[in-house]
Image (cartoon, rainbow, N blue to C red):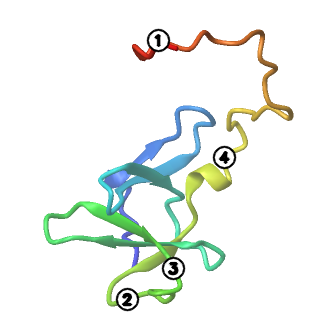
Amino acid sequence: MASNSPHDVSSCQRCGAPVRWTVTAHQQRQAVNPDPDPAGNTAVYTDATGRLRSRGLTAERPALEHLEWLAMPHAATCPRQPRRRAQPRRRAGVRAVRSQGWQR
């Protein structure tokens, strides 16, 4: 189960909400909401060194294993996420193609 101790809880820089930082299998940092969430899609566990690790639930491993708990990634619930563009940018011109040394 998730530990309820506040020692590994920090604040989101955008909204100020409490988050726990985990490390994914690809060594990327991921913020998750600090409390277990049955609607979450991320399995979180503490490894042998005491670091919080996370993995996404996949078709190959769809259920929680051993001491994992279900968490919601904070990016899914943060109210101050950067807005995405509704339309792609218009291109202003055409880039010149570098010469490859070919001659006609």
Is 58 drawn above or below residue 82 in the view shown?
Answer: below
Mark nearer the viewer, 3 or 4? 3
**Identity, as a three-letter code, of the amino acid under mark 2:** Glu
Q: Secondary structure at mark 2?
A: loop
Image location of residue 16, percent across then percent down? 58, 37
Viewer-side residue, 40 vs 15: 40
- For the point 56% across and 14% down, which residue is it? 97
**Quarter of the image holding residue 5?**
bottom left
**Identity, as a three-letter code, of the amino acid under mark 1:** Ser
Number of residues whose C-alpha sits closer than 10 Å to that of mark 1, classed few (under 14), some (14–19) or many (20 or more): few
- Circle 1 sits on which residue? 99
- Gap in angstroms between the C-alphas marked 3 and 1: 45 Å
- Gap in angstroms between the C-alphas marked 3 and 2: 12 Å
Image location of residue 78, percent across then percent down? 66, 46
- Circle 3 sits on which residue? 58
Image location of residue 69, percent across then percent down? 44, 78
